[in-house]
Image (cartoon, helix red, strand yellow):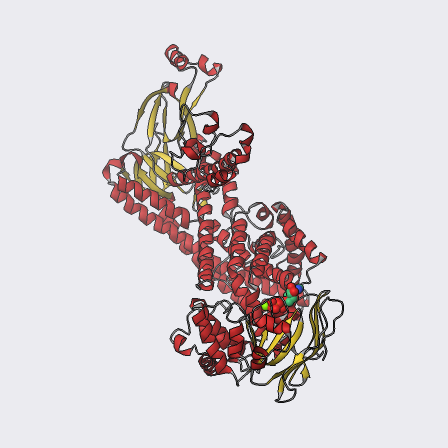
Amino acid sequence: MRTEDGKAQAPAPAPPDGRPARPGESNGAEQLPPAPAAPPAGAPRRRKMGHADFSSRGEPILWTLGGGLALGVILITGFLVMVFWNGLVTFYPGPIEVVTLKDGKLVAGEPARSEVFRPGPEVLRTLDEAARRAVAASGGYVSRTLYRIGNYDLYNEDFRWVPEFEVREVRTPPDMFFIERLEWGSFVGRIKALKRDGQVLEAGKFGLGNLRGEHAEARARWQRVRRIERTEIGEVNHYLEKERLAVRRAALAHGEGSAQHREAQAASAPRTEALKKRHAGLSAQAKAVKEVDEKVHLVLADAAGREKEIRLSEVVRFYPANSLGWGDKAGVYFSRWWEFLTEEPREANTEGGVLPAIFGTAAMTILMALAVAPFGVVTALYLREYARQGRLVSIVRISVNNLAGVPSIVYGVFGLGFFAYIVGATIDQLFYSERLPSPTFGTGGLLWSSLTLALLTVPVVIVATEEALSAVPRSAREGSLACGASKWQTIRRIVLPQAMPGIMTGLILAMARGAGEVAPLMLVGVVKLAPELPIDGFFPFIHLERSFMHLGFHIYDVGFQSRNSEAGKPMVFVTTLLLIGLIAVMNAWAICVRNRLKRKLSAGHF
Amino acid sequence: MAAAAPGLGLEMEETVYHVKEGAEGANLELENFCLWYGKAQALHGIGMKVQKGIVTALIGPSGCGKSTLLRSINRMNDLIDGLSVRGSIRLDGKDINAPGVDVIKLRKRMGMVFQKPNPFPMSVFENVAYPLRVDGVRDRRMLADACERALGEAALWEEVKDRLQENALGLSGGQQQRLCIARAIASDPDVLLMDEPCSALDPIATARIEELIARLRGHFTIVIVTHNMQQAARVSDNTAFMYLGRLIEYGGTNEIFVNPRLPRTSDYITGRFG
Ligand SMILES: Nc1ncnc2c1ncn2[C@@H]1O[C@H](COP(=O)(O)OP(=O)(O)O)[C@@H](O)[C@H]1O
Ligand SMILES: [Mg+2]
């Protein structure tokens, strides 16, 4: 019996439910394990089995194990499918429906989703007889649709629920436009007219092509203004600040009003003057472009005819939602993705792109990996190769393992208290005293975030490295030592290269953990909106002290901190998709590197 | 030079020497060498002189301390915790366990070949160049010359000269072992220690290694541990028979095999125990 059990269980987790019930078989025979390898007509091998033997055959435990696995797989798949689906459809342009309500009002918008709800008695009381009967007929339930109505500046809301019983008529007129703007979110309505230099062109008198051309020009003007104001004036400001700091440094070093201070002032004065002149020139340029821009306006009207006039350059994108072909829709879809990936956020992060957040996440993760790799590997090397294996080392090892279980926010507090307030403040005192009281390193920033996360993930690297080191065969070490290599040479040339795949595995795990960590970062440098990227064209090019944006925090911010969480919801999924994608890409890259190493180490055959 | 370790239930006998002391220049001299792994004594008063340029085989049943003895000669046992030794091993007259001895320099004078081929996961070239590299040699020419010479001496050059940059793990087992021999002799050591170098190889590869040992004879002082009586008889000049941590009989291979003095030696050689 035992051997039969063994055979039956060896090809394990085949769910027993696949076995058809055979009528007429005895109870005991039915309980036989579902040996998939055995032929179905293996009648002679079946033996009668008592109930006491049921658990001894291990089937219940198999059910539990398999069930646990299945549940996990279903949860993960469900989660991924949800994120992918929501993330992928968000940017797809939907139609605009114009709903005429029973009271004659008009609601126009992109339907976001529908649901069934049960209206309360106070709502039912307001309905007419026919509607009430219809509601009663469907058991008191009514369906309602959430419309993305836009026009926040006109209505003070972005979304509106429309219950079925209020609807008289739904149309999709082809002249409805979906217009994304720089401010106030999107606009849903018709284009009435284009105003240019005081001339008014009525909507019927120009084609969509003309409008597109005008729009492209307006956008180019806007881009130009932005470039002047951001990049060029930003550069002038940078140099002005440098001049100011130089004078301040002289004052701090030699005293206010000292000869050196006055000398520095005198030296800086002409340069400052020239910079100010350049500043004025650039401002004038920007103003000139803005004046041209000021003369081109678009007159919009919502479904009910309420007009709204905006500068054409404020329009990011517009499309006639109900008369789009497949190609146009795809165009809108991809242009939205492109904007999302390459632009900065606007409208309290609910619109625009997430480039700074992508950048911040990647930069932080890479810096963290750079910090954690040597730190963890050196620690593990010492623990495994040099330290005398005894009580003390065991205690250290246990402590390191326990570090992995400390809540991450604790690391954030530590990072803030130690890195920013102690180390950073000291650095500021010593090297950036001219900027005080505004802190440079004395507050959260990219560097402190990376180091905090490096601390958080270092146990993972240490444990993985120790395991990898101990897996290097003794024969390799002895071979090297017998060649007259010192211990360090053996470690560097033989042990470390062979342990590298294992170390990389640890690093990958650490990176995956670190890239997704948000809580501690909120304390040590992540912000809602970072005006400057941590990398720019000014020396030293990488500004480790700057605060930065992070996709994980962006998700939290967009989803729960924005003025309208309904508006942020789609962005939550898109950003989540992106975060998962980014981590997947970074891990895939690291895994590729590891596998290349592995192949190099195990090309052998005997 | 008596092996004296009372209380082990083994009737005390002195090592029987056929080798005439001082007949040729002794390269390695062991004198009353004892070794303990923690409290367990593994070697009992080993005394033997190994002559320069000849092949000495260490034979004896499993666990009798052959590897331990071999590894004591280049102090590979240093890695083991709780190890203690007594007596002396002298290389060219200098005690290798003396306080001021640089163990790395010592190992550079000795090559070692292990039971299982253990080439490093690097190119063939880098494997052979390894002892020179760790010695600080950077010059490509020198490395290449040493590599060609060592591979030539190890009878591997013809087979691998076109694949020097390929991973050494891609070679066959026998080639790998010859590569390890090439690595062991690349820095031109005085002594070559081999611990059952053929036990993981097939008969053809074994035959090639034996040929190789015969060719290397005269260039290096070779000490080889083997389980294979025929192999010991074929390749060695002198043979030392060990039993339970003691050196039982030591002499010219012919004499030991043809004319062993002690019954235990003849029993082992004829395969009556072991
Ligand atoms: N690292 C070690 N620690 C403790 N005992 C050891 C160690 N290595 C070998 N021994 C013991 O020393 C004795 C001799 O071993 P060894 O030299 O490997 O024998 P051989 O090579 O002749 O088969 C054996 O009893 C073995 O158990
Ligand atoms: Mg052995």
Could you say where residue B8 lies in the image, as x and y percent from the top left? Answer: 73, 66
> Taking A197 as reference, is B93 above or below it?
below
Q: Quadrant of ligand 2?
A: bottom right
Q: Residue at x 40, y 52 (%)?
A: A225
Could you say where residue A250 lies in the image, as x and y percent from the top left? Answer: 63, 67
Q: Residue furthest top?
A: A129
> Taking A225 as reference, is B175 above or below it?
below
Given residues B118 and A372, the one toward you in this image is B118
> Taking B4 as reference, is A109 above or below it?
above
Given residues B266 and A242, the one toward you in this image is B266
Q: Residue at x 50, y 73 (%)?
A: B180
Residue A536 visible in the picture: yes
Q: How many dots with numbers?
A: 0
Q: Residue at x 41, y 46 (%)?
A: A340
Could you say where residue A269 lies in the image, as x and y percent from the top left? Answer: 55, 66
**Which quarter of the rendered picture does the C terminus of chain A lie within?**
bottom left
